[in-house]
Amino acid sequence: DCLCFPGHESINNECVKCGVGTYMRQQAMAGEKCLRCPDSMSTLSEGATSVKECVCLAGFQNTVTGCELCPRLTQSAVGGDCEVVIGVWIGVGIIVVLIVSSLIGTAIYRKYQRLLVARRIRHEERVIKAIETVSVPGYPVVVMSASNFIELGGLQLHESLRDSGKLKVLDSVQQVKTLQSQKGNLVFVSHQWLGWDHPDPNKDQYPVMVTAVQQLVNLKGWSLDNTFLWLDYISIPQIHRNMQSLAVGSLPVYAAVCNAFLIVAPAALHSDTGEPCGFKSHMNRAWCRAEQFAHLVGCGTDSMFFATDTQNIQQLTREEMRLSFFLFEASLTCCSRGHPGAIPCDKELMVDPLLGLYAQIVASPIDSESRRWVKELIEEEKDRIFPHTHKVEKPAGDEAASQLGSPTPSSRSSPAVRQSMRLTHKIRRTEVTNRELFGEMIGVVDCHLKRGDLSTQLMRAASKA
């Protein structure tokens, strides 16, 4: 009989190659069929002639006991050795990174949420504190009768007047209201200091104050003995700095509880800088605007007057009053001096009082045309009146130290020297930083208003007054 070539088998008298995974031994007998490779083994091609051509399948490796599965995270090709699979490791690495990232992301998110909650709590607490700031004076309301003021002859130090018994001390807002119920009237006198150490060193303002008070008393039908003046140099401690800070922080309360608001701003020169001062410069001072704003919120527009000479007092127009709403656009001494020695900006000291005033006005009913005008203007210009942030300019580098040591031009310096020093100040390098003012706190007040608990907060604060 005819025999097929090695690696072939006879099928229907035809020689056919053994398929993949089978072989035909070379000394095969006639009619013998192709044999299968052992378990987990196969040939690489057809026509294998020996079991030796059988190799381990993919995923298996050859050992002394036969083909065994490759260990985890390894792989092999047909007939090859097991090797670490880079793709698997990359996949595992990606999974690990995703898990770790998820854990870190969750931790960061939770921390962020905790920070948001803590920030919200701080804002809530600050709003409550701000409401108390404009409801409860941190320092008593100290006033002087108009009759005694007229006899002074000039502005005198608070401590001197206190020691001589010429001041009247009202320890609470309730005492102010009691005095007013007994036909007593309080006048808030607002003016610009004309010297660093004394508000009126050359007595430019005092005579105007005297005639303006007399005219106001006559206009209102009051008496001098029952009219009491609040004026910073007289009413605020000038020596004890802590007491002074408490009184300055209570300015909005003082301005808001007075029956009338009187601006005294005659044309004069600042004794230390030589700068011209008057009604225009007064209206451009941030603290002066803050006093006006507090009175507008507390009392409306009907009793705000100004005097620039000894002739006649005049009532402020709505356009002039409108300026007081934009106090953060006005000038401050700390800003003009470039905040030497890293002193805080006065704008930041104004935030709490103004926040409290905002709470008062939005929660109050519209009981007059005057209050309607105030509320509508605040709503219309809210972002401008209560800015989220502000820019602070400070001396940069060595120039900061240079500015601290620079002399202040005095009234005895020649105009040329004063101008030179001002120019030197202007050309110094400064660094500008953005700092938060009201941030989200106006929104916090608005949330209290929507929830209906703002009035409750105001009533609680008022009960402490």
Image (cartoon, helix red, strand yellow):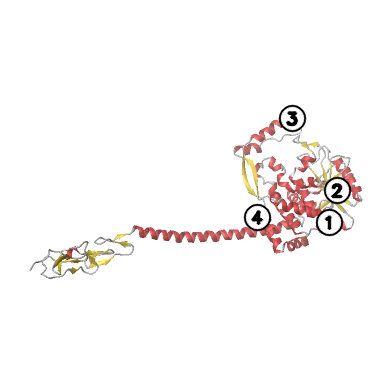
In the displayed structure image, the side of residue 184 where residue 128 appears, left or right: left
Q: Nearer the viewer, mark 4 or mark 3?
A: 4
Task: Tell me whether circle 2 and circle 1 mark residues in contact (CB < 8 Å).
Answer: no
Which one is in front, 440 or 38? 38
Q: Amino acid at mark 1?
A: Val
Q: Amino acid at mark 3?
A: Pro
- Label 3 CA crowd tier, 10 Å (few <14, some 14–19, many 20+): some
Horizontal and vertical percent for residue 356? Answer: 73, 55
In the displayed structure image, the side of residue 60 where residue 336 appears, left or right: right
Q: Earlier in the sequence, mark 4 or mark 3?
A: 3
Q: Earlier in the sequence, mark 4 or mark 2?
A: 2
Real-space Cα distance between discs 2 and 1?
22 Å
Question: Residue tagged by mark 1?
Answer: 176
Question: Residue tagged by mark 3?
Answer: 415
Mark sitting on residue 246: none
Q: Earlier in the sequence, mark 1 or mark 4?
A: 1
Q: Earlier in the sequence, mark 1 or mark 3?
A: 1
